[in-house]
Image: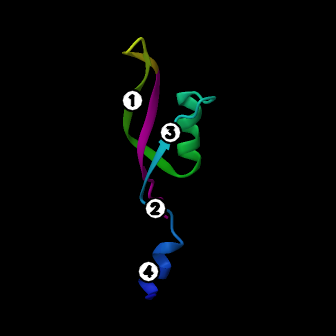
Amino acid sequence: MSKKQKSNSSKKPTKKKFEVTKNETIDDCLARIKQEGYQPTRRVEEPIFTEENGQPVPKDRKIVFDTKLVKHEH
């Protein structure tokens, strides 16, 4: 492994996805994102369906934030 690969493996990834968990509010997720040093760049909502009587019925939704690492300048 080269020196460049070693230094990159110990750093945080520049992009990361965060999903709002079942017992978490959107504000809680945004606070978790900020605490880990990231900034949201995009919010994606996907519906979750179940099948009842052969028809898809909306059950819930999944919210995922695409984020980028915040660069701290010294």
Q: CA distance from mark 4 to mark 2?
A: 13 Å
Asked whether 69 falls inside the magenta stretch, the response is yes
The residue where tag 2 is placed is 13
> Which residue is drawn at the image coordinates 58% and 27% (left, top)?
25
**Where in the figure is residue 54, as x and y percent of width and height?**
38, 15
**Figure colour scheme:** rainbow
Q: Quadrant of residue 31?
A: top right
The residue where tag 1 is placed is 45
Residue type at mark 2: give it: Pro
N-terminal-most mark, 1 or 4: 4
N-terminal-most mark, 4 or 2: 4
The magenta span reads 60-74
Residue farthest to the bottom? 2
State whether the magenta stretch is mostly helix, strand or loop.
strand
**Where in the figure is residue 16, as x and y percent of width and height?**
45, 52
* Mark identifier at residue 19: 3
The residue where tag 4 is placed is 5
**61 shown above or below 33:** above
Residue type at mark 4: give it: Gln
> Which residue is drawn at the image coordinates 44% and 55% (left, top)?
69
Packing grade of label 1 (10 A; few <14, some 14-19, many >=20) is few
N-terminal-most mark, 1 or 2: 2
> Which residue is drawn at the image coordinates 46% and 61% (left, top)?
13
Residue type at mark 3: give it: Glu
Q: Nearer the viewer, residue 33 or 54?
A: 54
Q: CA distance from mark 3 to mark 1?
A: 10 Å
Q: Nearer the viewer, residue 30 or 63?
A: 63
